[in-house]
Image (cartoon, grey):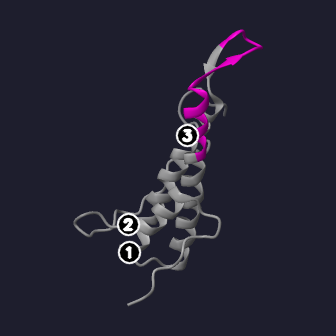
Amino acid sequence: MTTTPSPPKGSGTPGRALWRSITSTYELAEHELALLGQATTVADRISALDEIVNAEGAMVDDPRRGMQIAHPALSASRQERVVLARLLSALRLPDETDHRPQRRGMRGFYGPRRVTGSGAAS
């Protein structure tokens, strides 16, 4: 039996909780531990952003526009949640039937495609 690795130094409470919930159940390779370490940082960042939104509210005054807008920390939190989901997905942890999900590329930027058909210059 191997020992459970410690969370990265400087991890906050949410990051440590995420780290322990995964490392107490699964044995991860070094590259997976690196991904999990990044996920702990993101989990801590989400928690900090959510604390800001809870303290200051979801809407803030924008003096340039003279109206209220969504708090910038709310948008940042949403973006960090996407990053966290992608990092955890990249770990490919087994599901409840103990099967690893299929390997698939992550969604993201799609490169330019060659246009074919009528209207193309010859």
| Residue furthest to the top | 66
Task: Look at discs 3 and 2 and give the one toward the viewer.
Answer: 3
Q: Identify the residue under disc 2.
A: 93
Residue receiving disc 1 = 26
Around disc 3, counting alpha carbons within 10 Å, would you say few (fewer than 14), some (14 to 19), or many (20 or more)? Answer: some
The reply to whether dot 1 and dot 2 touch (C-beta < 8 Å) is yes
**Tag 1's secondary structure?**
loop
Segment tinted magenta in the rendering: 48-67
Is residue 114 visible in the rendered image? The answer is: no
Please give left or right for residue 40 compared with residue 22 in the image.
Answer: right
Above or below — where is 45 with respect to 69?
Answer: below
Task: Please state the horizontal and vertical placement of residue 98, each as a whole percent of the image.
Answer: 26, 70
Kind of residue sitting beneath label 2 = Leu
In the image as oriented, which residue stretches furthest toward the front? 55
- Quarter of the image with the N terminus is bottom left
In terms of sequence position, does the residue under pointer 1 or pointer 2 come before the other? 1
* Three-letter code for the amino acid on which mark 1 is drawn: Tyr
- The residue under label 3 is 50
* Number of marks in the rendered image: 3
**Sequence order check, earlier mark of 3 and 2:** 3
Q: Is residue 53 magenta?
A: yes
The residues tagged by marks 1 and 3 sit, at their Cα atoms, a distance apart of: 28 Å
Q: Could you tell me how far apart the alpha carbons at marks 1 and 2 are, in whole angstroms? A: 8 Å
Q: Are marks 3 and 2 in contact (CB under 8 Å)?
A: no
Q: Contact (CB < 8 A) between labels 1 and 3?
A: no
